[in-house]
Image: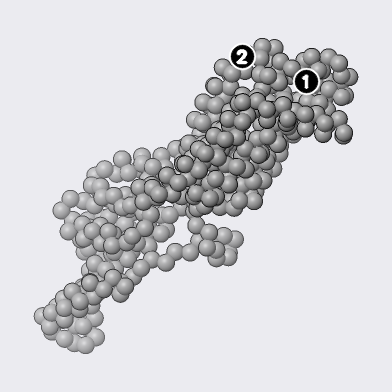
Amino acid sequence: MRFFWDSAILTCKRLLKRPGTLLITLLLPLACGVAGLYLAGEGEVLGVRVGVGVQPGDNFGERLYAGLARFEGPIIFERHDLTRRDYLEQEVAAGRMEAAYLISPQLGESLAAGRVVGDIEVLTSPRSVMDALAGEIVLASMLREVSPQTNRELLTTVLGLPPEQAEEIAAQLYTYYAGREDIFLEPVFAYHAAGTQTSTYPLPVEARALHGTIALFLLAGVIWSLPSLARETPGILRNLPPAVSRVFMLGIAFALTLTGLLQGMLGLAAIALTHPAAISSLPTSAMLLAGYLLCLGLGGSAVVLLTQRPGAIYPAGIFILIFTAALGGPLVDLAEISPRLAAISVAFPSWHYIDGALGGSLQPLPVLLAFSLALGGLTMALGKKR
């Protein structure tokens, strides 16, 4: 055990003295801080898109859509012709649009007749989280538009007023209250988990990019450290018995984990300071980060034992970075494009870290530990052969 700690501490010291490690340590919090400041200030631009399909010439549908502009918030309602259903379906399926509400041209007539079943169709994807809130806003706008007619019917049916007089009173009241925004229905939306109400809201869309930046920087830092370790390690292992050599390699893995954890915590701290809304739970993110780095550290030690040409690690590392960025979740969750593609992302430890960090859940941690266990077993087996 003493040899393990000595190996880990000495390797940490060697890593921290190298310009590449110091560069990552400085650049990661700087990049996260600058990106956090920028994205926090651009929250209005990065709002959630929701489509509204209205048939041209549908007067009631046009008024309903115009009423949506009253509500200020992260949801951006976009008007589209009802004939562009295919486009709306593609945007929702790809995750570029949160949901789409297709307004039937018969909605106004149905409301007048007391029927509203099937006149508003909602397009959602498995990843939609704010479609219910958007629906509350659409409902509020619909009630606002139908209220004059409802009031006329109440005045004529309940009070027995002539239709002309009821029309005049309803028009006067509607004009008066139209200028009082606090009178009309405002949506109140509470998120629930496991049957209990919570004030936790979905993270902003840019949170994935921020956590993805940390994942990619840390992966690049490990790759950057491997060639020098691969050149030094064979000479050291030749002087060690098999059991001790395996302990030495585990010490190297732990040193890579500790060094990356220092860098990653600085990145998380920078995000917490500049864009706290992008972190659901700092302790949870830190634990997931440790699990992710344990995978990287053990994977790095296995690469050191496997490689015969240290110079080949950099070109191979570039491909690994590209594949991780495209498929491992830092930029986009493939499940938002197609559920069938989700199986590809599961093979990347970065996806599990980002998924847990965005959800504020430790559920992906056992998967990261399983990755670590498999990579640790590979390191032990290779260390015995060396």
Quadrant in the rendering for residue 375 = top right
Number of marks: 2
Residue at screen point 46% across, 41% down: 35
Q: Position of residue 93 (x, y in %)?
A: 40, 41
How far apart, in angstroms, are the residues tagged by discs 2 and 1?
19 Å
Circle 2: element type = helix
Residue type beneath disc 2? Ala
Q: Position of residue 304 (x, y in %)?
A: 71, 20
Q: Position of residue 152 (x, y in %)?
A: 19, 78
Q: Residues within 10 Å of mark 2 (few under 14, many from 20)?
A: few
Residue at screen point 54% across, 21% down: 319
For label 2, the residue is 312
Horizontal side, residue 361 vs residue 37: left or right: right
For label 1, the residue is 382
Nearer-the-camera pick, 42 or 111: 42
Farthest left residue? 164
Residue at screen point 52% across, 39% down: 30
Q: Is residue 282 visible?
A: yes
Between label 2 and label 1, give the one nearer the viewer: 2
